[in-house]
Image: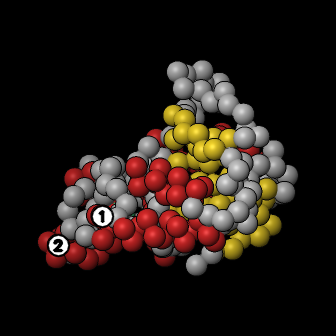
Amino acid sequence: MATLILVRHGQSTWNAANRFSGWVDVPLNHVGRQEAMQAAKKISSYRIDVCFTSLLVRAIETTAICLTEGTGACLDKSPVFKHDSDDPDWHGWDKYEGYIEQEIPIFMNPALDERHYGDLQGFNKADMAEKVGKNIVHQWRRSFDTRPPGGESLKDTAARTIPFFQNRILVHLKNGDNVLVSAHGNSLRSILMHLDNLSPKEVPHLELATGIPIVYEIDAEANITNKVILD
Ligand SMILES: O=C(O)[C@H](O)COP(=O)(O)O
């Protein structure tokens, strides 16, 4: 039995300003750091063995806060940040060769980055809805296969997150390791769509709040036996 915890990063400066972020590396704001601290408390009873995050600082910082601001199971271990590849045979310049008994490796991989929002990045979402219409903006933000101009659809995002989940994360879960994944609204929506078997018609209704952990219990055959949202 293993536990998978998914958490969307805390509120960023551009979440607060209602601007499309995508791959722009905006940081957490004060509210986001508080949300991450609350998430840390909510998951503090779980032993975390390994973490995965994106290359974006809002998710990296959320991971760090989740591991260091809790009260319990992780405090005797050092978090160790490592660049990562989704190739299981990768022998890069930064391969993790640490001591898992005393450390919690945090693998940072671009496969978990937010969906690229293309030409929309930086624009205010409400202004864009006024300009092109609410329905179009909703399609860009929530449909499965519509690409925002110059950017990725959720389907495109899933094409990198799901192989990464299967190749890099699932092996740990099958091994009985508890895994924390801190990532983004849409990179996590694509993973939840896969885990919860949501159809392209259902996924537009899936919304993820910032800083709220979603906990899956997973058996040795990788079947989900329980899911709880710690809101
Ligand atoms: O990239 C962004 O702007 C946010 O992380 C997610 O935005 P969305 O809710 O508009 O998809």
| Quadrant where ligand 1 appears | bottom left
The residue closer to the viewer here, 223 or 183, is 183
On the question of residue 118 being in view, the answer is yes
Mark 1 residue type? Thr
The residue closer to the viewer here, 129 or 174, is 174
Q: Circle 1 sits on which residue?
A: 13
At horizontal 54% and vertical 35% (from top left) the residue drawn is 82
Q: How is the image coloured?
A: secondary structure
The residue closer to the viewer here, 12 or 163, is 12
Image coords of residue 117 (percent x, y): 31, 55
Q: Label 1 crowding class (10 Å Cα cut-off): few <14, some 14-19, many 20+?
A: some
Q: Circle 2 sits on which residue?
A: 127
The residue mark sitting in front, 2 or 1, is 1
Q: CA distance from mark 2 to mark 1?
A: 17 Å
Image coords of residue 18 (percent x, y): 27, 70
Q: Label 2 crowding class (10 Å Cα cut-off): few <14, some 14-19, many 20+?
A: few
At horizontal 25% and vertical 70% (from top left) the residue drawn is 17
On residue 142, the disc is none
At horizontal 60% and vertical 45% (from top left) the residue drawn is 79
Mark 2 residue type? Asp
Image coords of residue 58 (percent x, y): 41, 55
- Position of the C terminus, as image quadrant, is bottom right
46 vs 228: above or below = above
Q: Is mark 2 within 8 Å of ligand 1?
A: no
Image coords of residue 115 (percent x, y): 40, 53
On the question of residue 129 being in view, the answer is no
The residue closer to the viewer here, 113 or 149, is 113
Mark toward the start of the polypeptide (2 vs 1): 1
